Every structure is written in structure tokens, then in C-alpha cells.
Amino acid sequence: MSERQAQVYRLVEELVTRRTGVDIAGHLAGRVQGHVDEQVRRLGLEGPDDYLGRLESGDEGSLPLLDDLLASVLVHETFFYRFQSQLVALEASIIPELVGSGTRNVRIWSAGCSQGPEPYTLAMLAARSTAGTDIGFNVLATDMCGAFLGEAKKGIYRPDKLGELPADLRSRYLCPGGEGTFEVRGGLRERVRFKRHNLLDPPPERNMHVVSCRNVLMYLGRDGRRRAIENLVSALSDDGFLLVGHSESLRDVPDLLGVDRRFALGIYRRGGAASPPAPVGPRRAPQEPPPPVRAEPPATERPGKTGTAHAVSLIRLEGEYDADLRPEKLASLKESLGEAIDKGGDVVLEADGATLLDMSTAKLVARAARLVESEGRRLTVRTGKESVLRWAARHGLQVESGPSTKEVRQA
Ligand SMILES: C[S@@+](CC[C@H](N)C(=O)[O-])C[C@H]1O[C@@H](n2cnc3c(N)ncnc32)[C@H](O)[C@@H]1O
């Protein structure tokens, strides 16, 4: 590789970071080089310099180029009903509380929505919790990448994107989409509006009651993250809620908004943890205070030490877990482990489907195991595969052998 070529790859990386705030240096950088080379071949360009020139030109042809670039380098892993304990809190407590305080139309923004499962999930929960009332809701869904938005608007998904979407939501809001896919029903689709928006820019709309920006901030560099958080907060209504992902605590920006301590689930509130405002005569004022948040799983899923059924979270490992080559797989595993830790009970990693498990993955699992074990629970790796057994033994992870089960979610 010539010096100039290396410099062009770097300039393209810098352009991505400048435009999105995403910290691309390091493990995502390899993707840039592969993408640039492929585009040069596909478009019959003279070389990387020619590509960079077109990308930076700002003319009509540069937007599709930027879109293709973002679609291939940004992590866009997403699925329905992600981080379910937070969603339970949203449906059981936040939406009733908003309605109880007089909100007639619940406004929700899914920022960094990728291919759409998140805004559709939020719409399902809002639809269910306002069913039979005259309370309205709508969901604004934004992402910086037009290619992801195009997929989101289609609303058609493979079964592996459904995550742990409960059966009743699945049958009420999805229908068969052909060739084994699922399609979001028209009625729900109408409640979700998609728009291209960069989180580094001021919000496209304001006065949002709920802003969900999950699994996006973790990819932004320090400055981008701060700017994005300021923009998200400025979109909130006076007592609006901000939801972030598992590993996205806003502890470093305490001046911007208060944590709602009732939840401890990555839920923040513009007005801080104040008690809910008094109801102002909604047409359907709840007779009782809003139900308590079920931050913990329902009784049937609680860990054995509560005396009820013993919950086991099953996480299936499939494919390559390599921090350098497949950072999104580790991010997804981290999230699944976080959800399992929140949920209570034992955790089993079904690992026969893993074809590569690196040291970073072992460290991640070992950290989760320590957390789980500190509460008297167990985290085990279930496998009959020699290579996985060796990996687990090398890193001191507990192993069990046993039949594989289908009730698992893929990380
Ligand atoms: C890992 S996905 C998260 C999707 C969804 N929120 C979820 O939790 O399932 C991250 C998304 O953030 C988007 N993104 C990254 N930087 C962005 C920016 N500066 N502005 C808007 N979207 C951005 C990416 O395009 C990608 O679709």
C-alpha cells in the first residue's frame, strides 16, 4: 500500500468521525479500507483518491456514496423487544404516568433507529397501553443512514430479528411477509414516521415525552457523545424521559438531566427523579397511582432464592467472536449478558455454534460470571465442543454439558 493510499483511508475514517461522531479509529477502521477498495472497483474509479474526491464533493452523487459508506462501516445490529426490562418499565409505568399527568398524545422519538425494530417495538407498546382510550401516540424514528431507513420503512424482517418479542405482540402487530419473513401491519406502520437525522444536529422535533437512544452513544467519541446527548435532552418535554442502552450510563454528564432512580434501568428524566406531577384532568384519569415499575422480572421468572420458579437466561453464541474483526458481535453479547444479569436467575451460554472465541470475549463472559456469582447465581458455558471446552477452561469459566434448547436468543 502506498503512503498516499494509507493517507486516503485515514481521511475517509476522519470524514466518518466528523460527520457522525462515531469513533471509527481502531477496530472499525479495517471496514473503511475494505469498503473504499470495493467502491473503487465497483464504480470503475482511478483509485482511492478519486473516491475521496467524489465523497467530499458535496454534489448530488456524494450522498449515496456517504450512505453506502455508513451502511458498511457503522454497527447497526438491532432486533425487536431489545432490553426488555426497560420496555416493561415503559409500558407499565412511564406511559401510564404520562397519561395520568394529562398527556393527550404521547410523543416518542427513536433516535438511531437502524432498520426499524426499535421504533416498531415502541409503537407496539404504546398502542397496547393506550388501547381502548382516546389517548393518541406517534413515534418519530430517525437514523443518519438512508439505507437503514429504507429497510425500516419496508417493515419486513427475518425471524431472527424478532428477539424475544412476546407472542401476543407478534400476532397482533405482525403478519406473514412471505418466504418466512414477518411484516409490520399497516395500522402500526402508520404510527411511525421515518426521517434522516444526524444526532450531532439539533433535534428534528421537540417536546418529546420519551426519547429512546439505545446502543448508539456507545459508538460515539467523547465530543460527539456530549453533543448528541445535549441534542437529545433539548428534544425532551419538561418532564420527558430519556432511555439509553445497557452500557451507556450518562454519569459523566450529570449537569444535563437527573436519573430517575425508581428505575435504575438506563432511564433518565428531564425533571430529575421528582415525584410525578399531579393529574390535570385527563379524560381517562387512572383511579389509582401508576403501577410500580417492574424492574425485576415477573414472579415466574424470578431467581430460585425468591422461592418461585428458577429462571434461566439462555444466550446462544453463533459464529465468530473476535473483538477486532466482529466488534458488533461482542457488543451484542455484552447487551445480552446485561439483560440476563438484570433479569435474575442463572445464565447459560450455549456455545456449540461459536466458531471463534477470542480473549476479549472470555474476559467479557468472566466479568459477567463474577457479577452473577456475587449474587449466588451461576453462569455456565454449555458445550460439547472440544475447542470451546478448551477456551472455557483456559479462562476459568464453568462448563456444563447438556442438550441444546431452542428457547434461546442469539447474541
Ligand atoms: C447499533 S444500532 C442501534 C439500533 C437501535 N437503537 C437498537 O438499539 O436496536 C446504531 C445506529 O446508530 C446510527 N447512528 C450512528 N451514528 C449516528 C449519528 N451521528 N446520527 C444518527 N444515527 C447514528 C447507526 O446508523 C445505527 O443505525
Image (tube, rainbow, N blue to C red):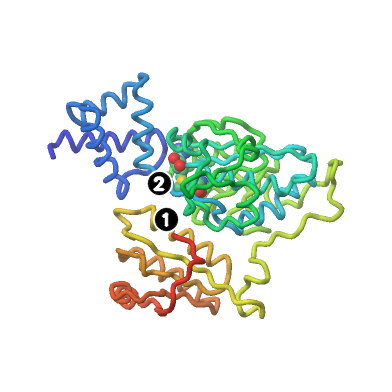
In the displayed structure image, the side of residue 172 where residue 396 appears, left or right: left
Q: Is mark 1 within 8 Å of ligand 1?
A: yes
Q: Quadrant of residue 55 in the image?
A: top left
- The correct choice, above or below, for 385 with respect to 262 in the image is below
Which circle's residue, 1 or 2, is located before the other in the chain? Answer: 2
- The correct choice, above or below, for 208 with respect to 325 in the image is above
| Quarter in which the C terminus is drawn | bottom left
Task: Name the spot of residue 376 as percent of width and height, x first.
Answer: 54, 79
Q: Inspect the image, locate mark 2, and give the three-letter code of the amino acid beneath it.
A: Val
Q: Is mark 2 within 8 Å of ligand 1?
A: yes
At label 2, counting other C-alpha atoms closer than 10 Å, the crowd grade (few under 14, some 14-19, many 20 or more) is: some
Task: Name the spot of residue 212 as percent of width and height, x first.
Answer: 58, 45
Helix, strand or loop status at disc 2: loop
In the displayed structure image, the side of residue 151 where residue 283 appears, left or right: right
Q: Inspect the image, locate mark 1, and give the three-letter code of the amino acid beneath it.
A: Ala
**Residue 75 numbered mark, or none:** 2
Judging by the rendered image, the residue that carries numbered circle 1 is 331
At label 1, counting other C-alpha atoms closer than 10 Å, the crowd grade (few under 14, some 14-19, many 20 or more) is: many
Task: Name the spot of residue 314 as percent of width and height, x first.
Answer: 49, 68
